[in-house]
Amino acid sequence: MIAVDAAGLESKPISPVSLKWIDKSPYPPISDFFYNIDNSKRNISLSWNYGPKNEFEYRIYKCLNGNPFKLLDTVTPDFSFLVDHYTIIDTAIEYRIMASFNNGDLSGFSNTVKVDL
């Protein structure tokens, strides 16, 4: 690489610079995210397993019938499940989850869990 100033003077050539993207979050996404449907009560039970410790909370997001995801609930790390209720007009529900840590870091989002009703 050579730099050229306004007067047309050239710098000595330098070696190319290599860059590497560094992910800001040291925490992986939650990969074990499951659901179970209880049609008699119109409940969807969500559960997850996550390895890293020092979580502050889990954030569970919900998408109804193709609309944008919205925060459904937050739970403390003492819990690894959540029960959600669905209505008769719901045809498809999607969920995602992420972990929030005491130091302000966030895990990546889990894979989306899609529930077809």
Image (cartoon, rainbow, N blue to C red):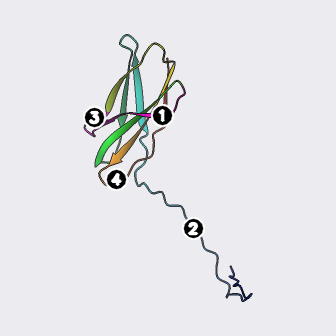
* Residue plotted at (51% across, 18% down): 91
Of the numbered discs in the image, which one, if any, rests on residue 69? 1
* Element carrying mark 1: loop
Picture quadrant of residue 39 = top left
What residue would you read off at disc 4? 104
Q: Earlier in the sequence, mark 3 or mark 4?
A: 3
Q: Amino acid at mark 4?
A: Gly
Q: Are marks 3 and 2 in contact (CB under 8 Å)?
A: no
What residue would you read off at disc 2? 19
Q: Amino acid at mark 2?
A: Leu
Of the numbered discs in the image, which one, if any, rests on residue 85? none
Q: Amino acid at mark 3?
A: Phe
* Front position among marks 1 and 2: 1
Name the quadrant of the N terminus: bottom right
Q: Are marks 3 and 4 in contact (CB under 8 Å)?
A: no
Q: Earlier in the sequence, mark 3 or mark 2?
A: 2
* Residue plotted at (60% across, 74% down): 17
**Magenta-colored stretch includes residue 79:** yes
Of the numbered discs in the image, which one, if any, rests on residue 79? 3
* Residue plotted at (57% across, 67% down): 19
Residue 107, how many percent across, how many down?
41, 47
CA–CA distance in space, label 1 to label 4: 22 Å
* Front position among marks 3 and 4: 4
Q: Which residues are magenta?
A: 66-80
